[in-house]
Image (tube, helix red, strand yellow):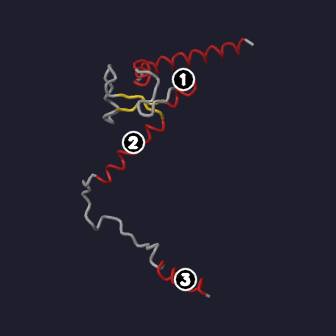
Amino acid sequence: MSSDNSRMEEILEEARRNRELKDKSYRGRALKLFPWICARCGREFEGKRMRELTVHHKDHDHDNNPPDGSNWELLCLYCHDNEHARDEVSQWYDGSSTGSEEDQATLTHKPFDALGELLKKMKTDESK
C-alpha cells in the first residue's frame, strides 16, 4: 500500500512541476493575460475545453514573446487553423512566384474534353 502512496505522490509532484513549467510558458502567460475567449469567433472556453484554446503569434515568430503579450492572441483550434491556412493560400496569389513557366506544373488531364460528344450522344439517345 505504501508503494501505491509513494507512486501517487510522484505523479502529483510531476503534475505540479509540469504545471509550473506551463505557467512560465508563453501559453500559460497568455492565459493569465487574456480572457479565455477566441479573439476571432468569440467562443468562451473553460475546463477540459481549454486545450482547444491556442496562442497565435501575430507576426508568426514563435520566439517573439514579449512579456505584455502584444504579439499574442488566443484563438480556438478552428480559427487558428483558418488563420494559418489563409496565409498559405495568400502565398499562392501574391504574385511573388520566382519559378519559370517550365518549373510550373503542367496540367495533362482534361476532364471535360469529351463532354461535347457525351452530350450529343445523350441527346440522340433521348430522341429515340
The numbered disc on residue 46 is 1
Q: Quadrant of residue 93?
A: bottom left
Direction front: furthest residue: 127
Residue at 48 percent across and 36 percent down: it is 77
Residue 16 or 59: which is nearer the viewer? 59
Give above or below for 31 relative to 43. above
The kind of residue tagged 1 is Glu
The kind of residue tagged 3 is Lys
Q: Is residue 103 left or right of residue 29?
A: left
Q: Position of residue 94 (x, y in %)?
A: 27, 52
Q: Quadrant of the N terminus?
A: top right
Q: Secondary structure at mark 1?
A: loop
Q: Tally the marks.
A: 3
In whole angstroms, how far apart are the C-alphas of marks 1 and 2? 24 Å
The kind of residue tagged 2 is His
The numbered disc on residue 84 is 2
Residue at 60 percent across and 16 percent down: it is 12
Residue named by callout 3: 123
Residue 64 or 119: which is nearer the viewer? 119
Q: Nearer the viewer, mark 1 or mark 2?
A: 1
Q: Nearer the viewer, mark 1 or mark 3?
A: 3
Disc nearer the start of the sequence (1/2): 1
Residue at 38 percent across and 29 percent down: it is 73
Q: Is residue 126 left or right of residue 74?
A: right
Give above or below for 66 relative to 94. above
Disc nearer the start of the sequence (1/3): 1
Q: Are marks 3 and 2 in contact (CB under 8 Å)?
A: no
Residue 50 or 61: which is nearer the viewer? 50
Q: Nearer the viewer, mark 3 or mark 2?
A: 3
Residue at 63 percent across and 13 percent down: it is 9
Q: Quadrant of the C terminus?
A: bottom right
